[in-house]
Image (cartoon, helix red, strand yellow):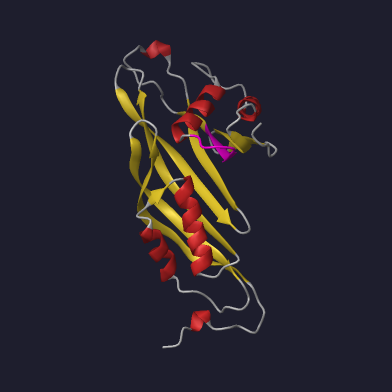
Amino acid sequence: MKDIQSLRDDRRINIRKVGVKTISYPVTVLDKEHRTQQTVATVNMYVNLPHRFKGTHMSRFVDILNRFHGRFNLRSFHLILEEMKQRLEAEAAHLEIGFPYFLQKDAGTGSIGLERYECRMHGSLQEKDDLVLAIEVPISLPRDPEHGEGMPRSMGRWGNVQVSVRFNHFIWIEDLIAIIEDGLGLGSRLPDSVESVCCRLGGVLAGNPAIRWYNVIVENLADGYSTFASLQGPEQQDA
């Protein structure tokens, strides 16, 4: 049979994006304490095709993903993007994975619980590669001391903060979560406003030499609506 997808296309129309999305895939990500952590990701893979091709075989995306056995780190991200770009003869390659990441935390009652954080990695490769890591960190309501020490640490959620970063050099997911949570600096009190939380986090991230660029979105969940503030830092190189 003819390979229709790889035939030359004389219409000179570039396909902006072609690929596969919402692949549910078991993945292994780096874990500072346990070396690795098994989780399940939602994966999107797509490329920008030059006008000379009619399309591409969609099965090639999953073939490439399978070759790396679901192991994701900074190096494998680059290698997957490179193979996508070369094998599919694309002008640019893109890979997105979203996954829950779990950390053991003191629940405030003397027991250890698991805290869930939603993470997303987005990599692109054209002339050079680019990787953005995004993490959503919940902002919990402080425990009401009138209910006694036996009650859970948090009785609900005030909102959340979404932080996206580009790196000057490697940083553990756990360390980035700790930077964000320490930067919130809330303790047992509620945030003053979404603006104050946003500015506080921006100051903390701007002063970290591992972080080259950041974007912060703080959201407060209210009854029937939500408020938000966002802040983006400039690109900065490691000194």
Q: Say left or right for 205 vs 70.
A: right
Q: Residue at x 66, y 27 (%)?
A: 199
Q: Is residue 135 magenta?
A: no
User: From what the image shows, is residue 21 above or below residue 116?
Assistant: below
| Range covered by the magenta-colored residues | 160-171
Between 150 and 134, the residue placed more toward the observer is 134
User: From what the image shows, is residue 25 above or below residue 2?
Assistant: above
Residue 227, visible in the rendered structure = no
Q: Residue at x 45, y 70 (%)?
A: 58
Residue 200 point in image, percent of width and height: 63, 24
User: From what the image shows, is residue 94 above or below residue 209?
Assistant: below
User: From what the image shows, is residue 95 above or below residue 236?
Assistant: below
- Corner quadrant of residue 234: top right
Residue 178 point in image, percent of width and height: 48, 27
Q: Say left or right for 128 vs 186.
A: right
The residue lying furthest to the front in this view is 239
Q: Is residue 167 magenta?
A: yes
- Corner quadrant of residue 67: bottom left
